[in-house]
């Protein structure tokens, strides 16, 4: 299945410009009919856990933040690679 995979450190409901911009890009792609998967770090998920949540027309894959930033980013990239292979 073709679509768009967006990987970002932050997305809504997190605060900040990056979170807002990422979420807007994802929503705009979905509004054009793209299947959008958004992989992002989240403090709302157990550290190291991975989730799947529908936010509007965007499938969001939150990844729980780990104590070390490098480990969190590595986990984010790993999950994105797995999703890219799956879809």
Image (cartoon, rainbow, N blue to C red):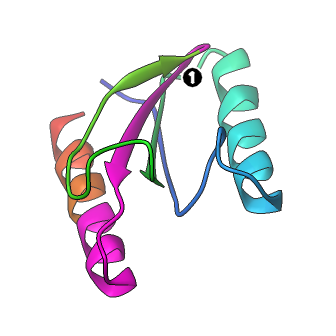
Residue at the (17%, 46%) spot, across then down:
85
Residue farthest to the right?
Answer: 17
Residue 62: x %, y % from top left: 39, 43
Left or right: 83 with respect to 17? left
Q: Is residue 58 above or below residue 17?
A: above
| Nearest the eye: 74 or 65 | 65
* Image quarter in which the C terminus is found: top left
* Image quarter in which the N terminus is found: top left
Residue 54: x %, y % from top left: 47, 17
Residue segment shown in magenta: 56-77
Query: Is residue 32 among the parts visible in the rendering?
Result: no
Residue at the (65%, 36%) spot, across then down:
26
Quadrant of res 41: bottom left
| Nearest the eye: 62 or 59 | 62
- 60 is within the stretch colored magenta: yes
> Mark 1: few, some, or many residues within 10 Å (few <14, many ≥20)?
some
Residue 32: x %, y % from top left: 71, 19
Residue 60: x %, y % from top left: 45, 32
Left or right: 12 with respect to 75? right
- 73 is within the stretch colored magenta: yes
Residue at the (33%, 86%) spot, across then down:
70
Q: Which residue is mark 1?
A: 34
SS class, disc 1: loop
Query: Is residue 33 among the parts visible in the rendering?
Result: yes
Q: Is residue 6 above or below residue 68?
A: above
Residue at the (43%, 42%) spot, across then down:
44
Numbered-mark total = 1
């Amino acid at each position: 299945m073709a679509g768009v995979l967006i990987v970002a450190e932050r997305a809504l409901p997190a605060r900040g410009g990056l979170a807002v911009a990422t979420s807007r890009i994802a929503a705009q792609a979905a509004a054009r009919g793209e299947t959008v998967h958004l992989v992002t770090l989240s403090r709302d998920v157990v550290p190291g856990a991975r989730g799947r949540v529908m936010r509007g027309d965007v499938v969001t894959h939150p990844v729980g933040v780990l104590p070390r930033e490098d480990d969190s980013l590595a986990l984010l990239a790993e999950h994105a690679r797995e999703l890219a292979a799956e879809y």
